[in-house]
Image (cartoon, helix red, strand yellow):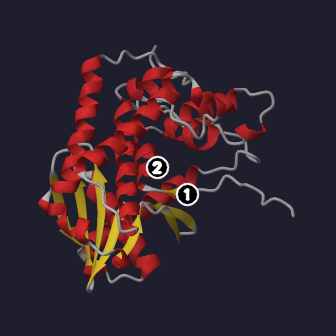
Amino acid sequence: MALKEIRCELSWSASRAKEFRRCRREYWYARYASWGWWQEQPRGEKYEVMVHKCLTSLPAFAGDCMHRAVERWFQLKRGGGEMTGPELYQEARELFRAGWRESAGGGWQARPNKSTHLEEHHYGVELPAERLEAVRAHLERCAANFTAMPELAPVRSAHPDNWRAVESLDTYTFLGTKVYAVPDFAYQDGDTLHIWDWKTGRPREEDLFQLHTYALYACEKWGADPESIVLHAAYIGAGEVQTVPVEIERLSEAQDRVSESVREMMELHYDPDEDPVVMENWPASGAPAACRTCRFRGICAEAPR
């Protein structure tokens, strides 16, 4: 059986849109410059770009460990088990330790696109003991809040039969473009659909926009009535929840924003297998502030040295 041809197709997500707005050069590195690295023999420039593309920061990695631990909490509950706050913390901590060893010890080199590789290790950033202790304490606080916050009681008590999504990566098509959605948790309570997003960082204005894109996904994929959807941004590090019932006007604004973003990306999209790159389309527009923390700063000619 012939293998399906892999093409560099345009796709959209809230995080990709943010990347596109922040710096076109960063977006080009992340979405086009490493395309076909798996065919590059010997390994060269595309492979190097891919390695940088897969870098993750310490805060982002800690957040990912917490998300995976919470996903494990749901898996146990589906099977009739339970996980306490201390157990949830230990799950996240072990995930963090395993990833840390992989990054610090060079284990990421065997499969750089499937492994943990921290920016801080890659660029030789000093990580004092106080900072690592802060990360540990943050994971412990997140775990305690997830399992004890009164605002999350409906999440913890929702019956698995009513779950609609748990960390489920899915897509739908909008303007001929694949749109990604990864609701952390969604469940049905009577006629009301609740969509939750766990946040381990501080509240940001963009968080509610991301949740509204999940509401668009729910309408498209599940046929949900927009006015029956309630959105929840759970800041488990800070111990607070922002709850917003969906309003048609605001959902329409979010859809218009997605539409505008998709069209902007369409204008610059190209097939790196067929088309030459026009670098004028990809200026380093994130400088100077964003350059200092960009994962591509080691290979971008525009990054300050």
- Rendered view: 100 above or below 94: above
Task: List the single residue furthest toward the bottom.
Answer: 191
Front residue of 83 and 184: 83
* Residue bearing mark 2: 16
Q: Residue furthest front?
A: 81
Tell me, for residue 162, which label it has, or none.
none
Alpha carbon distance from label 2 to label 1: 9 Å
Image quadrant holding the N terminus, namely: bottom right
Q: Is residue 255 visible?
A: no
x and y percentages locating residue 170 in the rendered image: 50, 65
Q: Residue at x 17, y 45 (%)?
A: 238
129 or 241, which is in the foreground? Answer: 129
Residue positioned 24% across, 58% down in the render: 233
Whole-percent x, y for residue 45 in the image: 69, 27
Q: Is residue 217 left or right of residue 147?
A: right
Q: Which residue is denoted by mark 1 in the rendering?
A: 11
Left or right of 119? Residue 126 is left
Q: Secondary structure at mark 1?
A: strand
Dot 1 amino acid type: Ser
Q: Within 10 Å of the Cα at label 2, are there few (<14), some (14-19), or many (20+) other Cα atoms?
A: some
Q: Position of residue 284 (x, y in %)?
A: 48, 31
N-term mark: 2 or 1: 1
The image position of residue 206, as x and y in percent, is: 29, 52
Residue type at mark 2: give it: Arg
Quick one: SS at disc 2? helix
Q: Are marks 2 and 1 in contact (CB under 8 Å)?
A: yes
